[in-house]
Image: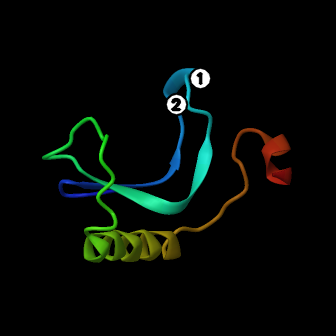
Amino acid sequence: YRVGNWKLHFLLEGAYGQPPEKTLLSEPVLYNLSRDPSEKFDVAAANPDVVQRILDAVSRHQDGLVKLPPAFDVRLSTL
């Protein structure tokens, strides 16, 4: 999730089948994209207020979602 220059990751996963494999993180990692566009340095510990602000935004977003059955593939409804 992104808010301004900040990006918070809850999982790591390579693109297009490339490493790393999908890994759920025990704690989210935070990057300041204006200073670290390559996302190499986790700054979550130094910015707990930013992490909380993004977590609050994610929670508000998720609260507004309505779960619907799959529209195209009924096999997915069992997941």
Q: Which mark is residue 17?
A: 1
Residue 34 seen: yes
Rendered location of residue 76, percent (x, y)? 79, 45
Whether the residues at callouts 1 and 2 have beta carbons within 8 Å, the answer is: yes
Q: How many marks?
A: 2
Q: In this view, does 69 lie to the left or right of 75?
A: left
Q: Quadrant of the image for the N terminus?
A: bottom left
Q: Which amino acid does label 1 sit on?
A: Gly
Q: Which colour style is shown?
A: rainbow
Secondary structure state at the residue bearing disc 1: helix
Q: Is residue 34 left or right of residue 69?
A: left
**In the rendered image of this protein, does residue 9 appear above or below residue 36?**
below
Rendered location of residue 71, percent (x, y)? 69, 46
Secondary structure state at the residue bearing disc 2: loop
Residue 1 seen: no
Q: Which amino acid does label 2 sit on?
A: Gly
Residue lying at 61% horizontally and 45% vertically, measured from the top left = 23
Q: Mark 2 points at which residue?
A: 14
**In the rendered image of this protein, does residue 32 appear above or below residue 38?**
below
